[in-house]
Image: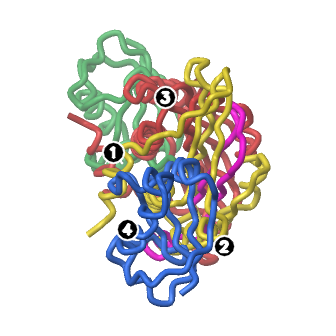
Chain colours: A yellow, B blue, C red, D green
């Protein structure tokens, strides 16, 4: 039942130690920096200190209520991330798999479109373009509403 | 009232600074936007396309019509791209 | 791209080392033995050696085609499993999260209802009842067809 | 033809053994079921409720009407409960 924001890399495996014991079903999602066919050298992630932590905690608590989770975890990095490094992860634990899967997707949809992070792509020449939000992510979030 | 205004991502780059403290009597976010856009060309550029701007009042996402009474911190930024 | 059936416990964390590097999105599901409020001491899982391995490999390959996976892994245990131990896991890696989530759910639905495993619940008195298939699992599988 | 018949879970317990080799001329799974059920009360008990029985022919899931020509191994078991 915890959200964390940090610059340091993390080890998905280590984060999962002991997670969800007794729950039956555990789902994890992790996002890694893709190399985009050599176009990308790194990602730079800006965030809103203070708001970020509060938003992640609120989304986690909402997911726990909505899907009756036994446990949840959200971890998101900021700063410069090299290709192949983990960007973030969510983990959900529930009695049955349906709830664990749904809660992980729900959290991802909120994270993608409502958590105050902004990604910039750093190419081999050092120049960086801000990543644009995808319509698809907004649609994905809309399915949980109403 | 004194208000901290924060800028993130390309809005920060256009404005040229991550945060500033201003004095304002704006009653809503929309009124604040108008005041800020009138300050100089950089603020105007940052706020030129409001469809591409998101707002948080005291670290909660808010609409343009949100009231500012009692607010201490307003942040402007592009649509989020986390995850 | 591998399916494995074994009696030995496994470490979810260790199984994930290096998995999905370069893929962008990694989803894992793991199932653990629930204690069912003290009613359960252990699970005993019977399987069909030979058919099991072939079935898991076939479901994995079908998921990889259907969801364009960069990688996948299925691991399922048999024999006697104590409360809290991992029963099985699936991991999927894809470019975007939608495909990784869908593929993991697809694999779970196939595993639950079409892979030749049978669970028996061992209670504190040693007696064991075979777990009955759930209608819900059959319905969950049906959504992928047609 | 010679055929290996395998039993799993509670079907195995009712029949009393995990596998047996039989001689049969059954053309389909359904004909084989009738032959097996006629062998003794234990086989009859295992196969009493076919709605609760699943079949694999040579390690592939099969229907009751599946042909047995060339088959070497037929398995009977309850609905699976893996995962």
Magenta residue check for A82: yes
Above or below C94: residue D67: above
Q: Are marks 4 and 3 in contact (CB under 8 Å)?
A: no
* Label placed on residue A135: 1
Q: Disc 4 or disc 1, which is closer to the eye?
A: 4
Q: Residue at x 52, y 62 (%)?
A: C129
Front-lying residue, C143 or A90: A90
The percent position of residue B75, horizontal first and vertical second, equals: 53, 67
Q: Disc 2 or disc 3, which is closer to the eye?
A: 3
Numbered disc total = 4
How far apart are labels 2 and 1 at the CA level?
Answer: 57 Å
The percent position of residue A131, horizontal first and vertical second, equals: 50, 39
Front-lying residue, D72 or C44: C44
Q: Is residue A133 left or right of residue C75?
A: left
* Label placed on residue B34: 4
How far apart are labels 4 and 3 at the CA level?
Answer: 57 Å
- Residue corresponding to mark 2: C125
Q: Are marks 2 and 3 in contact (CB under 8 Å)?
A: no
Q: Are marks 2 and 4 in contact (CB under 8 Å)?
A: no
Segment tinted magenta in the rendering: A63-92
Above or below B30: residue B48: above
* Same subunit: marks 2 and 1: no
Residue C5 visible to an observer of this rendering: yes
Q: Secondary structure at mark 2?
A: loop
Circle 4 chain: B
- Residue corresponding to mark 3: C60
Q: Disc 1 or disc 3, which is closer to the eye?
A: 1
Q: Secondary structure at mark 3?
A: helix
Q: Secondary structure at mark 1?
A: helix
How far apart are labels 2 and 4 at the CA level?
Answer: 75 Å
> What is the magenta segment's predominant secondary structure?
strand
How far apart are labels 2 and 3 at the CA level?
Answer: 38 Å
């Amino acid at each position: 039942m915890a959200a964390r924001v940090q610059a340091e890399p993390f080890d998905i495996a280590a984060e999962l130690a002991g997670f969800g014991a007794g729950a039956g079903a555990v789902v994890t999602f992790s996002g890694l920096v893709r190399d985009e066919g050599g176009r990308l050298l790194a990602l730079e992630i800006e965030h809103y200190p203070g708001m970020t932590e509060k938003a992640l905690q609120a989304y986690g608590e909402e997911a726990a209520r909505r899907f009756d989770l036994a446990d949840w975890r959200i971890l998101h990095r900021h700063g410069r991330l090299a290709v192949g490094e983990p960007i973030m992860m969510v983990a959900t634990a529930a009695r049955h798999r349906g709830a664990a899967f749904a809660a992980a997707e729900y959290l991802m949809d909120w994270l993608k479109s409502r958590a105050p992070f902004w990604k910039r792509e750093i190419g081999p020449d050092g120049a960086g373009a801000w990543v644009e939000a995808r319509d698809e992510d907004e649609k994905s979030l809309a399915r949980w509403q109403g | 009232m004194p208000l901290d205004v924060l800028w993130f991502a390309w809005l920060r780059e256009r404005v040229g600074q991550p945060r500033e403290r201003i004095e304002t009597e704006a009653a809503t976010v929309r009124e604040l936007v108008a005041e800020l856009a009138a300050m100089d060309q950089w603020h105007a550029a940052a706020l030129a396309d409001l469809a591409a701007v998101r707002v948080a009042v005291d670290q909660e996402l808010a609409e343009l019509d949100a009231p500012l009474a009692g607010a201490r911190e307003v942040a402007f930024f592009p649509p989020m791209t986390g995850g």
